[in-house]
Image (tube, grey):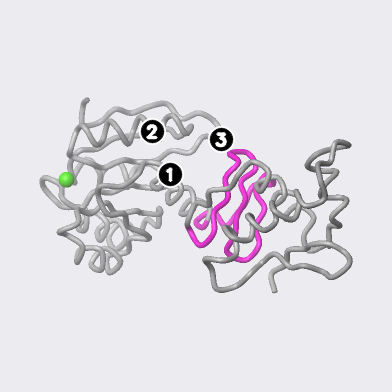
Amino acid sequence: MSSLAHMPEKQGQRTVLLVEDHQDLAETVGAFLESQAYTVDYASDGLTAMHLAVTEDYDAIILDIGLPGIDGLEVCRRLRKDARKQTPVIMLTARDQLDDKLTGFDVGADDYLVKPFEMPELAVRVEALIRRDKGDVSETTYRIADLELDTEREIAIRAGKRLSLSPRSYEILRVLMRRAPAVVSRRELEKEIWGDEVPDSDALRSHVYNLRRIVDKPFERPLIETVAGRGFRMAED
Ligand code: CA
């Protein structure tokens, strides 16, 4: 891989700059991001990273701290201070560089990830950064408080963590979020999920129970409300 492989930008596609001198890791991360429909530019040293970050408008920059030449922290500091670029930056840091994460925030990084990390985790973080930066949420995304449902990619994220939902629980959540803050009756929910072939009367109950266990229980504030005699609703408060 060359230090700079510039790829044409497709319309509507998100472009990220991946700065990583470890070639295997760069290839793995790059291939994964491309599989998630990102366009990826690469840099393997600080100066190339700096040049690209200043001259191009990326949606986000994934920036390794340990780089030859000027390191990731310095790249970020110069980007913010000298070039006055506010492109969202997520820092990659080795476990023994954990103190660097604090420095990372000092120099203007928006997030950090400790190596080794799972690829989907990186994708979720990058996506969240881009969303936050653009301040826009596409119409395929529903958001209530810190919970986000991306119906295009069929994923739910709460407080930056990807939630692992069964297909049925996901469906219930989708209906509740789409209709929020309206109350959705049990009957309506059953019809949305099973059509005319509603299973036994406890099926919905157990799916809602599971949904709450994942969406609400690990978090301080429950978002799924039972409205006695009427059904369920989701609301900010
Ligand atoms: Ca490195």
Q: Which residue is mark 1?
A: 123
Q: Which residue is mark 2?
A: 32
Q: Residue at x 19, y 33 (%)?
A: 23
Label 3: state its secondary structure. Answer: loop
Q: Residue at x 37, y 60 (%)?
A: 110
> Does 67 sit above or below residue 229?
above
Quadrant in the picture for the C terminus: bottom right
User: Which tag, 1 or 2, sits closer to the chain's start?
Assistant: 2
- Mark 2 lies within 8 Å of ligand 1 (Cβ measured): no
* 53 left or right, relative to 155: left
Q: Quadrant of residue 45?
A: top left
Q: Residues within 10 Å of mark 1 (few under 14, many from 20)?
A: some
In whole angstroms, how far apart are the C-alphas of marks 1 and 2?
9 Å
Q: Which residues are magenta?
A: 132-160
Q: Quadrant of residue 47?
A: top left
Q: Which residue is mark 3?
A: 12
> Does 21 sit above or below residue 103?
above
Percent from the top left, x then y, of residue 42?
29, 35
Given the image, on which type of amino acid does mark 1 rest?
A: Ala
Given the image, on which type of amino acid does mark 3 rest?
A: Gly
Given the image, on which type of amino acid does mark 2 rest?
A: Phe
